[in-house]
């Protein structure tokens, strides 16, 4: 590492705390299906099943024999209404959440589902009876032979607190009372808040009755819950309790399967504090990320989720949202979907093959998108063909963007626009997490920032004193720049990668961990998407100018462009990728690589 001028030349974004298992769970070249479609395994080269489907032992065994390495069998914490209603019998409402008004409420996106004339309620993960139902599902899981557990809507009750006024059933109120008792002794701020509200004796304390006595109505709670007494403690309790329940549920699953290597994934959107609180419990994220398909533009909003997942040390097998897939089903924009795949893999994650995707609109409810043959499968075979240029590779970054979990809890300091802009400008970057009580393993330290040339600071941070002191030092030294001074921040970030001949190419540099002799890789993503044609306009006569300090000053003499072959045949990975030698020239502190043409996505391997 060249440390001249105090600048760390090569910064590999290494996977963070406790990530060894996570890395092994999902490889960067893995091809994941959302649901199980055995007849499509070979066409796409499927290796991982996300939500899976039928978990009959013979079927799971047959999936392994057909090349599936990780079969995650899913338990739905909200979607298994028929099973829950059968299990609950006449006491089914004891398993349902209650809102502030005391009423059960249905899962908004399952409004079109019913069983025995009962709607699909939002089930309460604090209800002992509901927990019995969920735990009974682990017996089925254990018998299946699946080596992964997936939990859909794992947030349970906590997922409904902030927008459906949820979390007020008697089980929840009892548990909140006990939580307050336990935490008052160790949390001076909470003790002071209780004192301020005159709450000395917690025996018999009923939070809902307390709020009602204060004049809080269901309408007031819905619109201004954050301003009500103890509301932060209430949400904090729900998130901690439900996250802990998932952790204990996973331990039970491991014990029942007798498989200590059993993986856990949850459907979590990654990029918000409540979703990230579960990260340390997970092997990898398996989730929906909104891609704003209706805009008919290449997406940048998933970038922040992928970068946060890097910072958390977890892979993401991602898919688009139900609304995105409803749009794609209607409009058949295949090239747009392929750009989502390329984006994800270029950033080190695994956009699921669109074999069978959940679609949702308010009007149509749940429906399904089954990918036509021949429009996506060849791209996934390209992924499999390039395993050597994907597996073990991490992002290269000289710029760090600070993510502050405490600020994000109250919707401040959003880094999504910063991440999108850096991505579009070809500035390789990483996200560094400043943690709080939901992410205690992640702290902003001098060591965490040491390797970055530039640190970009969003507005509205709420760091604790120790983390603020670290940032203050970086600000005083001039290495950290606030996003408020956008032009200064961008100038400080510089242009380590430029593309001559097109402003529609994004370049993502990556490097192999622990193997400095392995080829360096540049992912090239064509962003010149035409919605009307559903096609990328090919970009031609390009010259990539890449500063060599991104790669620790390595000198490259050869370059090979790997691009997908759209008429390759199922099962034949070797024919799914074509290699083209590129011209390479040294130019001062940069290497110049000539690329005659790029259609959609390509991988440039730089060799010494
Ligand atoms: Zn409850």
Image: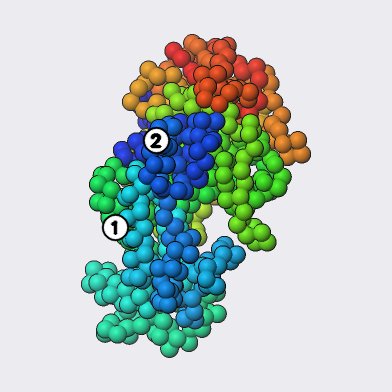
Residue closest to the eye, 462 or 475: 462
Between circles 2 and 1, the one closer to the viewer is: 2
For residue 541, above or below residue 230: above
Beta carbon of the mark 1 residue lies under 8 A of ligand 1: no
What is the spatial separation of the Cα atoms under label 2 and label 1, in whole angstroms? 28 Å
- Residue drawn at x 41%, y 37% is 62
- Residue drawn at x 59%, y 22% is 568
For residue 597, above or below residue 506: above
Would you say the residues marked 2 and 1 are in contact, meaning their CB atoms lie under 8 Å apart?
no
Compared across the picture, whether 116 is left or right of 196 comes to right
On-image quarter of the C terminus: top left
| Residue 446 in the image, given as x and y percentages of width and height | 32, 42
- Residue drawn at x 41%, y 77% is 91
- Residue drawn at x 28%, y 75% is 178
Give the crowd class for mark 1: few <14, some 14-19, many >=20 residues within 10 Å: few
Q: Label 1 belongs to which residue?
A: 248
Secondary structure found at label 1 = helix
Residue 365 visible here: yes
For residue 559, above or below residue 113: above
Residue 486 visible here: no
| Residue 537 in the image, given as x and y percentages of width and height | 71, 29
Q: Label 2 belongs to which residue?
A: 64
Secondary structure found at label 2 = helix
**Residue most toward the left?**
185
| Residue 433 in the image, given as x and y percentages of width and height | 40, 48
Give the crowd class for mark 2: few <14, some 14-19, many >=20 residues within 10 Å: some
**Residue most toward the right?**
532
């Amino acid at each position: 590492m060249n440390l001249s001028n105090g600048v760390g030349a090569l910064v590999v974004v290494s996977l963070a705390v406790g990530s060894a298992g996570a890395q092994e769970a999902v490889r960067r070249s893995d091809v994941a299906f959302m649901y199980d479609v055995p007849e499509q395994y070979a066409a796409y080269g499927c290796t991982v099943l996300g939500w899976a489907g039928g978990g009959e032992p013979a079927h799971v065994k047959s999936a392994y024999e057909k090349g599936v390495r990780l079969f995650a069998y899913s338990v739905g914490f909200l979607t298994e209404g028929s099973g829950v209603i059968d299990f609950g019998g006449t006491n089914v409402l004891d398993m349902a959440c209650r809102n502030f008004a005391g009423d059960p409420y249905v899962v908004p996106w399952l409004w079109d589902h019913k069983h025995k004339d009962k709607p699909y309620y939002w089930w309460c993960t604090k209800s002992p009876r509901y927990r019995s139902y969920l735990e009974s599902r682990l017996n089925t899981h254990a018998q299946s032979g699946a080596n992964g557990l997936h939990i859909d809507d794992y947030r349970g009750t906590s997922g409904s607190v902030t927008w459906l006024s949820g979390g007020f059933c008697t089980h929840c109120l009892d548990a909140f009372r006990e939580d307050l008792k336990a935490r008052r002794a160790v949390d001076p701020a909470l003790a002071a808040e209780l004192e301020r509200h005159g709450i000395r004796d917690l025996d018999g304390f009923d939070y809902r009755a307390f709020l009602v006595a204060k004049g809080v109505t269901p309408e007031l709670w819905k619109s201004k819950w954050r301003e009500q007494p103890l509301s932060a403690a209430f949400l904090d309790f729900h998130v901690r309790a439900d996250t802990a329940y998932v952790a204990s549920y996973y331990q039970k699953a491991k014990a029942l399967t007798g498989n200590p290597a059993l993986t856990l994934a949850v459907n979590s959107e990654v990029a918000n504090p409540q979703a990230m609180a579960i990260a340390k419990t997970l092997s990898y994220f398996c989730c929906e990320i909104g891609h704003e398909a209706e805009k008919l533009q290449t997406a940048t909003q998933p970038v922040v989720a992928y970068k946060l997942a890097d910072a958390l040390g977890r892979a993401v097998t991602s898919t688009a949202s139900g609304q995105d897939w409803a749009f794609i089903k209607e409009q058949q924009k295949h090239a747009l979907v392929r750009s989502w795949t390329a984006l994800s893999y270029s950033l080190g994650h695994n956009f699921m093959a669109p074999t069978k995707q959940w679609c949702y609109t308010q009007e149509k409810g749940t429906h399904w998108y089954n990918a036509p043959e021949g429009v996506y499968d060849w791209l996934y075979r390209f992924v499999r063909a390039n395993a050597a240029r994907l597996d073990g590779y991490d992002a290269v970054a000289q710029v760090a963007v600070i993510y502050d979990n405490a600020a994000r809890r109250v919707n401040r300091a959003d880094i999504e626009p910063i991440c999108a802009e850096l991505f579009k400008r070809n500035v390789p970057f990483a996200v560094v997490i400043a943690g709080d009580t939901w992410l205690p393993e992640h702290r902003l330290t001098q060591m965490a920032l040491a390797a970055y040339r530039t640190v970009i600071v969003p507005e509205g941070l709420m760091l604790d004193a120790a983390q603020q002191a670290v940032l203050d030092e970086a600000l005083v030294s001039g290495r950290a720049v606030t996003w408020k001074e956008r032009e200064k921040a961008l100038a400080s970030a510089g242009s380590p990668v430029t593309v001559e001949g097109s402003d529609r190419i994004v370049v993502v540099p990556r490097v192999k961990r622990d193997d400095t002799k392995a080829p360096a890789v540049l992912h090239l993503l064509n962003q010149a998407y035409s919605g009307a044609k559903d096609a990328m306009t090919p970009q031609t006569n390009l010259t990539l100018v890449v500063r060599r300090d991104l790669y620790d000053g390595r000198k490259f003499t050869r370059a090979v462009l790997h691009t997908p072959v759209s008429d390759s045949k199922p099962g034949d990975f070797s024919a799914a990728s074509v290699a083209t030698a590129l011209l390479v020239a040294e130019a001062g502190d940069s290497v110049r690589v000539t690329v005659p043409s790029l259609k959609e996505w390509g991988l440039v391997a730089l060799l010494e």
